[in-house]
Image (cartoon, coloured by chain):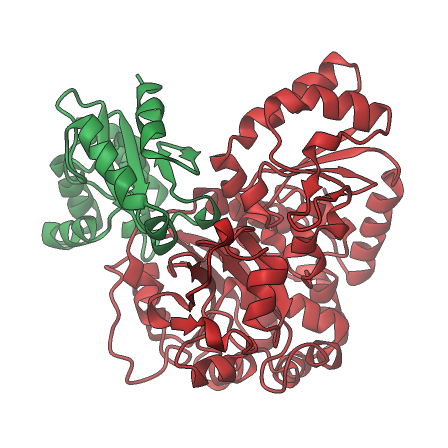
Chain colours: A red, B green
């Protein structure tokens, strides 16, 4: 692959990829994220490949191993495109039927469909299942549309167009202004304005600055950063590169915790591919902007997710917090200005640049804009990853999307925000999910949600 | 102890700033533990005190200063797994292997550990044996899983 030299070349490549793909060709998409792995998706994938080979369908059907679509409770999740037929709790023994009936004869295998627990109705399509239907999936929705190990899949969906737009049409100041206007707040929990943090690092008086992705998702019960990093690593890289351009960095780090080996693998592949395509490295898309990214593996230390500890770990030392007399945005890695945001924050950046701050601020509440991904775990019927616009009530998340409490029990409280958060009792369930509202209740936005019954 | 192999791994990081931790992780995954000789070799090649290398090696949970068993069993006791009975899974694993968390069986077959959240919270309780994840476990299934490893 010759390096792309301009935004126009990227667009041309996208068109070529799309034109070579037949939109009507059947595609079997299987979740290959860590969640479905725990349910044995490896065997399902092997069975599909075997069945396709046995039936001489090679070349006539695509097999896509995707990231986590979120519905972990019902894994292994298999979706048949272009129809979007969704099969749940698939085991290797189901594969012969899926291939012969759905892929070849275009018939639906009834027994693998989602059954609505209240109406007992069987739902065929992914988009109709209440777990998905009541969400707004700008970030996590891409996971089932692409193979995280394939840059062409990402480019086909318009990937890296935001980076191309920023580099070819916007000055770094303009990019920064757009993120500030979008009022993007840190998804890690504290909700600090990303634009303000970027500006602090940008204005810090040092030639060398760093951008850092915090993928040390330590909050127990939280796994949306894992899903994004495993399922769409290019999305995070693109956001990081845009941030680096706005802030004025030439180097970035991605800190991934030891417990996420698949995320390390997938982002490593993504970095290599992006370099090969000229989307990372020197003179990106002919713009003169240079940016390289290194992955730093964590080694199993909860405390290293704290920003100064994480930066100390990147320096190769014991990852313990250090006194922050000066913010890490000004004095971080090797005492250089270092802007750290979490995975989901970075993943939002391409959306803001592509669609504009006005679009972003049209979603959410007064003080909290955009969507937020939560991991819904604990005693709820539909566990998994849930992306909703800010302002959605806890009740809607637990009942409409989560399908209520398992075993028909009564909900006692929802634990949000991990160890730094709190428990929200059932009488406050109509509170909207919003940084400031949750703070008023004495909890934080956090990420993991464990309803207790 | 194959010092040449350790030297090869060290060579990968020659002259790189902040490489110590990544280097130790590579040796850990190669040998499954960090022998004294490896730590002394790193200290010599990187010109840092042995104590500093030990400090890092003993701080992080992913590194081991004692030989580990052929298979590493990690039981998740993060909040989500905890509320779904992770402790009972740990108890069962300790019973079956006749060791406590953090220990290795006498036959060097298994090392049992605990982790705080593997990120498969929706499927808790979860254990991971080497690279394989097992979700929605019950104490009864623990034995079955462990028996499948030889």
Residue in the image at 37% along x and 77% along y: A328
Residues A114 and A388: in front is: A114
The C terminus of chain A lies in which quarter of the figure? bottom left
Q: Residue furthest top?
A: A54
- Residue B90: percent from the left, percent from the top? 25, 39
Nearer to the camera, A411 or A196: A411
Above or below, A55 relative to B70: above
Residue drawn at x 31%, y 33% is B139
Instruction: Write the residue at 33% across / 67% down.
Output: A419
The picture places residue A273, in percent across and down from the top left corner, at 62, 46
Q: Is residue A445 at least partly visible in the picture?
A: no
Give the x, y percent position of residue A347.
60, 63
Measured as percent of width and height from the top left, residue B146 is found at 31, 24
In terms of depth relative to the viewer, which is nearer, A36 or A146?
A: A36
Q: At 12% across and 38% down in the image, what residue appears?
A: B36
Q: Is residue A87 left or right of residue A347?
A: right
Instruction: Report if residue A191 is visible in the image.
Output: yes
In the rendered image, the quadrant that contains the N terminus of chain A is top right
Left or right: B91, with A237 as reference point: left
Q: Is residue A65 above or below residue B150?
A: below
In the picture, measured across the screen, residue A103 lies left or right of residue B52, that is right
Tally of numbered discs: 0
- In this orientation, which residue lies closer to the viewer: B8 or B55? B55
Depicted A246 relative to depicted A60: above or below: below
Q: Looking at the image, is A344 positioned above or below residue A196?
A: above
């Amino acid at each position: 692959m010759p390096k792309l030299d301009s935004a126009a070349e990227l667009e041309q490549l996208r068109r070529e990829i799309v034109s070579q793909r037949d939109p009507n060709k059947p595609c079997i998409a299987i979740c290959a994220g860590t969640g479905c792995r725990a349910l044995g998706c490896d065997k399902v994938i092997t069975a599909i490949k075997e069945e396709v080979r046995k039936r001489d369908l090679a070349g006539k059907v695509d097999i896509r191993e995707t990231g986590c679509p979120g519905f972990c409770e019902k894994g292994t999740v298999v979706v048949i495109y272009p129809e979007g037929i969704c099969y749940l709790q698939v085991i290797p023994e189901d594969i012969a039927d899926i291939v012969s009936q759905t892929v070849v004869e275009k018939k639906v295998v009834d027994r693998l469909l989602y059954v609505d627990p209240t109406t007992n109705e069987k739902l065929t399509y992914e988009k109709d299942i209440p777990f998905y239907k009541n969400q707004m999936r700008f970030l996590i929705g891409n996971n089932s549309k692409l193979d995280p190990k394939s840059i062409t899949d990402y480019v086909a969906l318009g990937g890296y167009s935001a980076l191309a737009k920023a580099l070819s049409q916007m000055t770094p100041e303009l990019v920064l202004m757009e993120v500030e206007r979008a009022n993007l707040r840190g998804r890690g929990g504290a909700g600090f304005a990303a634009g303000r943090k970027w500006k602090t690092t940008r204005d810090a008086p040092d030639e060398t600055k760093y951008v850092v992705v915090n993928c040390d998702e330590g909050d127990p019960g939280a796994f949306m950063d894992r899903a994004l990093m495993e399922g769409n690593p290019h999305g995070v890289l693109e956001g990081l590169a845009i941030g680096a351009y706005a802030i004025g960095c030439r180097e970035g780090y991605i800190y991934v915790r030891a417990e996420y080996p698949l995320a390390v693998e997938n982002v490593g592949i993504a970095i290599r591919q992006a370099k090969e395509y000229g989307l990372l490295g020197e003179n990106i898309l002919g713009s003169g902007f240079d940016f390289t990214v290194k992955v730093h593996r964590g080694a199993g230390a909860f405390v290293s997710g704290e920003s100064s500890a994480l930066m100390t770990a990147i320096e190769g030392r014991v990852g313990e917090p250090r006194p922050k007399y000066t913010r890490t945005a000004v004095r971080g890695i090797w005492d250089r200005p270092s802007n750290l945001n979490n995975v989901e924050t970075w993943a939002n950046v391409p959306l803001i640049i592509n669609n504009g701050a006005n679009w972003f601020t049209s979603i959410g509440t007064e003080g909290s804009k955009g969507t937020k991904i939560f991991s819904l775990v604990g005693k709820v019927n539909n566990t998994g990853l849930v992306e909703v616009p800010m302002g959605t009530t806890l009740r809607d998340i637990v009942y409409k999307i989560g399908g209520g409490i398992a075993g028909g029990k009564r909900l006692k409280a929802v634990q949000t925000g991990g160890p730094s958060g709190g428990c929200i009792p059932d009488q406050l369930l109509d509170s909207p999910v919003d940084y400031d509202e949750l703070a008023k209740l004495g909890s934080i936005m956090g990420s993991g949600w464990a309803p207790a019954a | 102890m194959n010092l040449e192999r350790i030297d090869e791994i060290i060579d990968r990081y020659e002259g790189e700033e902040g490489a110590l931790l990544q280097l130790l992780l590579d040796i850990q995954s190669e040998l499954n533990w960090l022998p004294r000789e490896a730590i002394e070799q790193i200290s010599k090649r990187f010109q840092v005190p042995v104590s500093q290398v030990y400090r890092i090696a003993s701080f992080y949970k992913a590194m081991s200063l004692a030989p580990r068993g052929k298979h590493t069993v990690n039981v998740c006791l993060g909040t989500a797994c905890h509320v779904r009975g992770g402790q009972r899974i740990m108890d069962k694993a300790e019973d079956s292997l006749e060791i406590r968390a953090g220990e290795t069986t006498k036959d060097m077959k298994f090392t049992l550990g605990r982790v705080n959240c593997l990120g498969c919270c929706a499927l808790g309780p979860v254990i991971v044996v080497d690279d394989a994840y097992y979700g929605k476990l019950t104490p009864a299934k623990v034995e079955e899983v462990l028996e499948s490893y030889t």
